[in-house]
Amino acid sequence: MSGLTIDADACVGCGRCVRACGSAGVVVEGERGARRARVTDGCILCGACVDACPVDAISIERAAGDAALIDLSAHRDIWVFAQTDAEDRVLDVAFELLGRARELADERGCALVALLAEGAGDPGASSARQLVAAGADTVLRCRDERFSSRDAGVFAEWVCALVRERKPETVLFGATVFGRELAPAVAVRLQTGLTADCTVLAIDPETGLLQQTRPAFGGNLMATIVCPRRRPQMATVRPGVFAAPAPDPSRAGEVVDVELDCGAAPRMRVLSVAGSAAGDSIATAEVLVVAGRGIGSKKRLPLVRELAEALGAQVGCTRPLVEAGWLEGWQQVGQTGVSVAPRVLLSLGVSGAIQHVAGISGAQTVIAVNDDPAAPIFASAQYKVVGDCVSFAEELLELLRA
Ligand SMILES: Cc1cc2nc3c(=O)[nH]c(=O)nc-3n(C[C@H](O)[C@H](O)[C@H](O)COP(=O)(O)OP(=O)(O)OC[C@H]3O[C@@H](n4cnc5c(N)ncnc54)[C@H](O)[C@@H]3O)c2cc1C
C-alpha cells in the first residue's frame, strides 16, 4: 500500500505543507503550540508537501508497481489512438494528432505508432495506409467484431494490453465524446496521468517529458502540466486544435496485426443509432467568418452572412453573441465552444480573449479586423486590419460581388 506518513514528533505545525497542497490533502490542527499536520482523504500522493516540509517530517511510501518503482527508461515511442466512425473510417482528429505527434517524435528521435481498431466492416488496407501517409511509422491494427459495439471498455482492454506489452512513452487521444470516455478508462487501468483538452503539446527531447498545455482556472491562464513519474503520459486534444498534415502516399511504414484478448467482452449492444439533432458543425469549415461583439448589433448579421456566402465560408462567433441569442451555440469558437482549423479565418470585431483564441490555433491564415490596434487578436493573426469591421465587411462584399 502506498501512503503519506507524517512524523508527529518532527512536525512543527508550520503549515507549509497545507499551502503547497493543491488538493486539500493535508491540514494542520491542534492547540496553539501543539499544532500538527494530518493527512486527509484528499491526498493524491503528489509529493508537493514532502518537498515543502522544512523539517523532513513528511514522507511517501510507495508500493511495488507504484510510481517510484516505474522504470521510465523502459518506455519509448509516441502512440496515437486513431478513432474511427461506425463505418471504420478514420476521423480527422486522428490525422491532426498524427501531424503534431510526428513533429514530437522527430524531436524526441522515436517512432510514431497509430492504434487502429476496426469492427466488422471490411475497409481493406486503406485506413492503415492513410495513417502511414499521415506520419505513422507503424500501425498496430486489430480487426475484431467486438469493436463494433463501440464499448469503450473493450477498446480500453485492448489499448492497455498493448501498452503493458510494448511500453509507449506517450499516448494521445482525440477529445471526442468517445475519446473522453476511452482515455480516462485507460488512464485508470494503467494508473497514469491524463491531461484533457490540451491546446499545445511540446516535448523535452532529452527526457521525453511531454509538456501538456491547456486552459485552467476558468480559462484565465494556460497551465502546462507534466507527468514526471508515471508512464505512459497521456493527453486528449480536441478536434481542430492541430492542422492535419498533407498526406504523403510515398511514406513507408509497417502494419502489424495484433489480437484483442479473448476475455474482453462488450457490456453493451447497439440496438439502433438515433440521428443527431446537432447536424450543423463549423469544426471542419475550410473558410470561416467569425463575428465578435465589435460588429455592434444583431442587425449586422445579414451582412456577415452575405459576406460568408460570397467567400464560400461558414459563420462562427464569440461567446457573447451566443449569450445574446444572436447566433447558435454550435457556432461558438473557443474553449467552451468548438476548435476550428480552417484554411482561412476572417475575424470581425473580436477582441481575442484567451478562451476564444484557444479554439483557433489550428487555423492556417487568420485575418483580423479590429479598431483597437492593441487588440490581443492581432497576436494570432497573419493579416491585421486596424479599422471598422463593418465598413471592412461592406467594402469586401462589394469587391467580391464586382
Ligand atoms: C470559462 C470561460 C470560457 C469562455 N469560453 C469562451 C469561448 O469558448 N469562446 C469565446 O469566444 N469566448 C469565451 N469566453 C468569453 C471570453 O472571455 C470573451 O469575453 C469573449 O471572447 C469576448 O468576445 P468578443 O471578442 O466578441 O467581445 P469583446 O471582448 O467585447 O471585444 C469586442 C472587440 O471588438 C472591437 N471593436 C468594437 N467595435 C469595433 C468596430 N466597429 N470595428 C472593429 N472592431 C471593433 C473592440 O476593440 C474589441 O476588441 C469564455 C469566458 C470564460 C470565463
Image: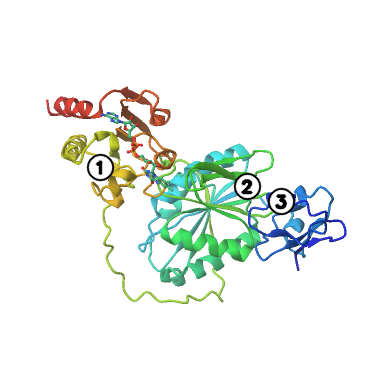
Report helix, strand or loop for mark 3.
helix
Q: Quadrant of the C terminus?
A: top left
The mark lying in front, picked from 2 and 3, is: 3
Classify residue 209 by image quadrant. top right
Asked if residue 200 is positioned above or below residue 148 in the image, the reply reads above
Q: Quadrant of the N terminus?
A: bottom right
Per the model, the C-alpha gap separating discs 2 and 1 is 36 Å
Q: Amino acid at mark 2?
A: Val
Where does label 2 land, which residue? Answer: 226
Q: Are marks 2 and 1 in contact (CB under 8 Å)?
A: no
How packed mark 2 is, by other alpha carbons closer than 10 Å (few <14, some 14-19, many 20 or more), is some
Where does label 1 land, which residue? Answer: 315
Q: Answer left or right for 227 relative to 328.
A: right
How packed mark 1 is, by other alpha carbons closer than 10 Å (few <14, some 14-19, many 20 or more), is many
The mark lying in front, picked from 1 and 3, is: 3
Q: Nearer the viewer, residue 252 or 2?
A: 2
